[in-house]
């Protein structure tokens, strides 16, 4: 039985929220039970997929089957919202006051994949506490939020809770659910009317139907099911904005209009015009590249005293600004992210780059053109290079793995066997250059099989120190960044520098395909996708010739069956 993705019967009680007459302690107990049950249903569906969960449209089979179809990889399932999505949804429902300041997730550090996030005791307790805090935040603004007077009547409470629950659950409420909410209000009203409505709000936010979104389909016959209009609205909104469907999108789902591909595209175009959508999509790519790890890195203060939290924040914001300029303001091909010699620097970053800062004050970010033979796009930005370095030195391994994996999606590399752990540490401790360490790994039969796949990429980046400054020498010795990638397909050749390599990569489809894979992975919560999966190839094939812009990639994903179709399962 594949518990990872299959729901045995879409009509099971779990599909509908579970608002009953209960005290807070009963609410907590019931939610724990529900989430424990739900976790059995979804274990692996937002992390490792179970054996056999990938249907015939998988790796190495672009057509998906002999009849030219690309079959759904994913079966019907229930998907847990990430912490950022959960908090954003509460904020959109009740305002910033509903989020405890020190508990609000930072969008800059959102994880790319939800692998390993499960509905365990810690998550349940955290979400119960956040639901309680959000409900209690109504104190002092009850009438403003609900439209009901503090001593209002049942009709007002019912009207507010119907609107609130429908938006929170991303679907219509039925009569039984509304009756159950009324029971919660009456229970809390034994203390006060305001308390009754607030307790119902807490029950809604504590419900699994708020923490999970469903992908159960429209009930049509056949092996493939289409997501319902409300499920599609949730899928689209959490993909593009990391939050609930807004009023326009929700209305399109309520009316059924979202089932029309033309309306789905209209909604997508509308959302793509919103600054918050653009920021969210840019942050998704930044998360896919692991740049958020920058905030967790440290450097030896004796060697790099300039590496402060302020510099880290500046490095991260540089990448945000470059993505905004290239992808959204200019509508450039995504390959421009690799080749741009323009960027944005404040006073701190100008010192790292060794360029003049022309801003009105040291905090202002100003546009600058970088030396064409030293820098090219995101791969040579100090933030990324610093995040991929050790505390006292660069890291050929970390940088090489990044290029091989996150930048070009060339496949996962397994961890080294434990038997070589001591040898790895000895190599790191040895007084050797990074190239000498790479040569030692290449000479070791155990290590070479893996390291030969990515070390060369890291060696190309040796001309950038642990905080991303360009350099020609290390300890007085000239740096040899030359690598031989002959036989490596589209990127094969001999390169003397990272810039040469980047310019060559930008002429291939590899980076654009990887960007597409990242966005499709995030939109579907399927982190097992590779560029060779037919779902990815199908999206790439529909991109307009010579127009691999990010909005076009998003449009192709939204119209792709991978986003809105699921396998019915057994």
Image (spheres, rainbow, N blue to C red):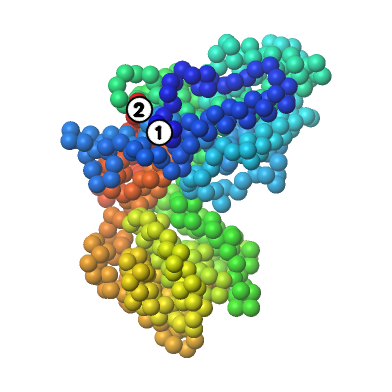
Q: Left of 187 or right of it: where is 486?
A: left
Is label 1 in a helix, a strand or a loop?
A: loop
- Give the mark toward the camera: 1 or 2: 1
In the rendered structure, find residue 154 and report the number of the disc placed on it. none
Q: Where's residue 68, x and y in %?
A: 19, 35
Within 10 angstroms of label 2, few (less than 14), some, or many (20 or more) residues?
some
- The residue that label 1 is drawn on is 2
Which quadrant: the C terminus? top left
State the residue in front, 210 or 358.
210
Q: Is residue 82 above or below residue 153?
A: below
**Quadrant in the picture for residue 363:** bottom right
Q: Residue at x 28, y 73 (%)?
A: 484
Looking at the picture, tell me which residue is in the foreground, 352 or 231.
231
Q: Residue furthest left?
A: 66
Residue 119's spot in the image, x, y percent? 57, 37
Residue at figure coordinates x 49%, y 56% from the top left: 290
Q: Which mark is residue 569?
A: 2
């Amino acid at each position: 039985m594949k518990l990872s993705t299959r729901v045995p019967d879409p009509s099971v009680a779990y599909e509908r929220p579970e608002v009953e007459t209960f005290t807070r302690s009963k609410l907590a107990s019931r939610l724990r039970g529900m989430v424990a049950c739900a976790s059995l249903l979804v274990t692996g569906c937002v992390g490792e997929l179970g054996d056999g969960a990938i249907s015939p449209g998988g790796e190495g089979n672009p057509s998906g089957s002999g009849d030219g179809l690309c079959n759904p990889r994913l079966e019907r399932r229930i998907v847990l919202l990430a912490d950022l999505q959960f908090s954003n949804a509460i904020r959109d429902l009740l305002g910033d006051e509903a989020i405890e300041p020190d508990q609000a997730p930072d969008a800059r550090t959102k994880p790319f994949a939800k692998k390993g996030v499960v509905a365990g005791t810690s998550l349940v307790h955290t979400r119960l506490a956040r639901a309680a805090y959000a409900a209690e935040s109504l104190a002092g603004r009850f009438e403003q939020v609900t439209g009901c007077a503090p001593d209002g009547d049942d009709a007002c409470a019912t009207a507010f809770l119907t609107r609130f629950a429908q938006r929170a659950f991303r679907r219509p409420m039925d009569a039984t659910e509304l009756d159950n909410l009324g029971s919660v209000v009456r229970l809390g009203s034994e203390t006060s009317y305001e308390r009754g409505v607030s307790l119902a709000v807490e029950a809604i936010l504590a419900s699994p139907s708020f923490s999970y979104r469903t992908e159960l389909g429209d009930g049509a016959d056949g092996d493939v099911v289409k997501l319902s209009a409300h499920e599609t609205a949730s899928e689209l909104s959490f993909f593009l904005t990391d939050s609930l469907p807004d009023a326009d999108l929700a209305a399109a789902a309520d009316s059924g209009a979202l089932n029309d591909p033309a309306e789905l595209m209209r909604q997508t175009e509308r959302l793509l015009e919103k600054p918050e959508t653009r920021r969210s999509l840019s942050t998704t790519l930044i998360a896919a590249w692991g740049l958020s790890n920058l905030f967790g890195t440290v450097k030896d203060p004796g060697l790099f005293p300039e590496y402060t939290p302020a510099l880290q924040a500046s490095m991260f914001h540089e990448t945000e600004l470059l993505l905004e300029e290239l992808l959204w303001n200019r509508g450039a091909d995504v390959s421009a992210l690799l080749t741009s010699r323009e960027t944005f620097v404040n006073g701190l970053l100008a010192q790292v780059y060794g360029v003049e800062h022309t801003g009105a004050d040291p905090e202002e970010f100003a546009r600058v053109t970088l030396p064409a033979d030293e820098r090219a796009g995101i791969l040579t930005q100090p933030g990324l290079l610093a995040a991929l370095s050790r505390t006292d030195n660069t890291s050929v391994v970390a940088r090489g793995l990044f290029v091989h994996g996150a930048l070009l999606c060339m496949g996962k590399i397994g961890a080294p066997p434990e038997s070589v752990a001591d040898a790895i540490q000895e190599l790191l401790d040895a007084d050797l250059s990074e190239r000498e360490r790479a040569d030692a790994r290449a000479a070791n039969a155990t290590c070479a099989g893996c390291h030969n796949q990515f070390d060369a990429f890291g060696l190309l980046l040796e001309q950038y120190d642990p905080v991303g400054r360009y350099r020609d020498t290390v300890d007085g010795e000239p740096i040899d960044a030359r690598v031989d990638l002959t036989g490596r397909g589209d990127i094969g050749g001999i390169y003397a520098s990272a810039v040469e390599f980047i310019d060559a990569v930008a002429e291939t489809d590899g980076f654009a395909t990887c960007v597409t894979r990242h966005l499709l992975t995030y939109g579907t919560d399927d982190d097992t996708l590779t560029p060779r999966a037919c779902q990815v190839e199908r999206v790439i094939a529909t991109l307009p010739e010579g127009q691999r812009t990010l909005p076009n990639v998003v449009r192709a994903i939204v119209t792709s069956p991978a986003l809105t179709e699921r396998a019915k399962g057994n």
